[in-house]
Amino acid sequence: MSTAPQAAAPALALPPRSHRAGSAKTSPVRDLLALTERPEIISFAGGLPAPELFDVEGIRTAFDAVLDSPGVLQYSTSEGDPRLREEVARRYVIDGLPTAASDLIITTGSQQGLGLISTTLLDPGDTILVEEPCYLAALQTFALAGARVVGVPYAGDDLDLEALERLAREHAPKFFYTVPTFQNPTGRTHGLDARREIAAIAQRQGFRIIEDEPYRQLRYSGDALPSLAEFAPDHVISLGSFSKVIAPGLRIGWIRTTADVRPSITIAKQAADLHTSTIDQAAAAHYLVSGRGEPALARIREAYAARRDAMLDALPSALPEGSSWNRPDGGMFVWARLPEGMDAASALATALTHDVAFVPGTSFFSGRPDARTLRLSFTTYAPDRIKEGLSRLGATWGAGR
């Protein structure tokens, strides 16, 4: 006896992705990396360290040295390699900020640190304050955390401190996120008086400061400035990274925590990936202790200073008349603004036809963007290549120059 096959039940639609995932913007820098893989393109878009300046010999020696160490290929503690934490703590102390190894949690790049802090401190719907414009990957992280992001404007090259206090009073934010030294994307730095006042506002209004310092060691002129944590130690959580001063492929960063949140951040780290690569941490520690790091960093600073100067010297002939730009004391970026009526995003398509790229500034804004802005990175190429790239950029504007 045969039976007729029964019709299959209709498939139910799959659940949608989360609202938080849908709210995160794509990174134009990552998108541009795909567009600029052709070797003939000179790209000022990515904040890429110069690979020819990596101390490959020293890094190779460090990995060779630690491979024979017991446990270097085994699971490890979530807080991180003790020797690496001691070395990072020692450097904070040298800079004038008392720090113990136990204050530090090693992360897989400082970007993971931002994610761990967001997981620990934020519930969906919480308000945070950021600089306007802001590091794009931080905006992505905060969107994924479901945060409500409010931008604090600048007045010229200085953060509007009155606006910071007013917005803190109005919104009761969980924290204020800042890159106080050679900011991404603008290259701006908060001066000494501004740092004191930012810390004082945090204490008066009762919010934390997330101090992201990946560029702190890339200073080419001017005097070093104290950490915000020196002025409000109980209110400041700091982030650091070796991506810009050793190599980004190591993916080694850290969080300098405060005692009240350290256990929760440690648990978040355990849940994220158990621990950062054991062998990479061990190699980084060996490299730092070996003494090779400081001479390598001195070479990087010298080269980047020359590249910054080459860009600043060529910008007057590369940008349309009426443009403006800053002169950063360090870091990796120059922030420019085109004349009234121009749009940097529209100009990018033309720039690519001239085999040169930059990042339009619009994606770095949490609120209403300034369409006239663009970010230029000066670290990837030698001075002659920078001048050639900016000559191509000058041709982009054509009759509009």
Image: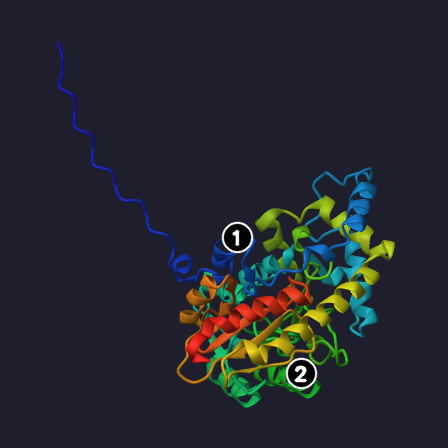
Which disc is residue 195 wearing?
A: 2
Above-or-below relation of 348 to 278: below
Q: Name the residue rendered at 82%, 69% in the picture.
A: 93
Residue 113: % across, % down: 61, 60
Looking at the picture, how far across and down is residue 36, in whole percent? 51, 56
Left-right relation of 253 to 394: right
Discs 1/2, front: 1
Q: Which residue occupies the foreground of this view, 286 or 55? A: 55
Q: Which residue lies furthest to the top in this view?
A: 1
Q: Quadrant of residue 18?
A: bottom left
Where residue 67 sits, quadrant-wise, is: top right
Determine the residue located farthest toward the bottom in the rendered image: 162
Q: Which mark is residue 38?
A: 1
Image position, residue 144 (x, y; %)? 46, 60
Amino acid found under the numbered disc labelled 2: Arg
Seen at 54% across and 78% down, the residue is 336
Separation (CA) of disc 1 from disc 2: 42 Å
Residue 270 in the image: above or below residue 346:
above
Q: Which amino acid does label 1 sit on?
A: Arg
Quarter that holds the N terminus: top left
Secondary structure beneath disc 1?
Answer: loop
| Residue 145 in sight in this render | no
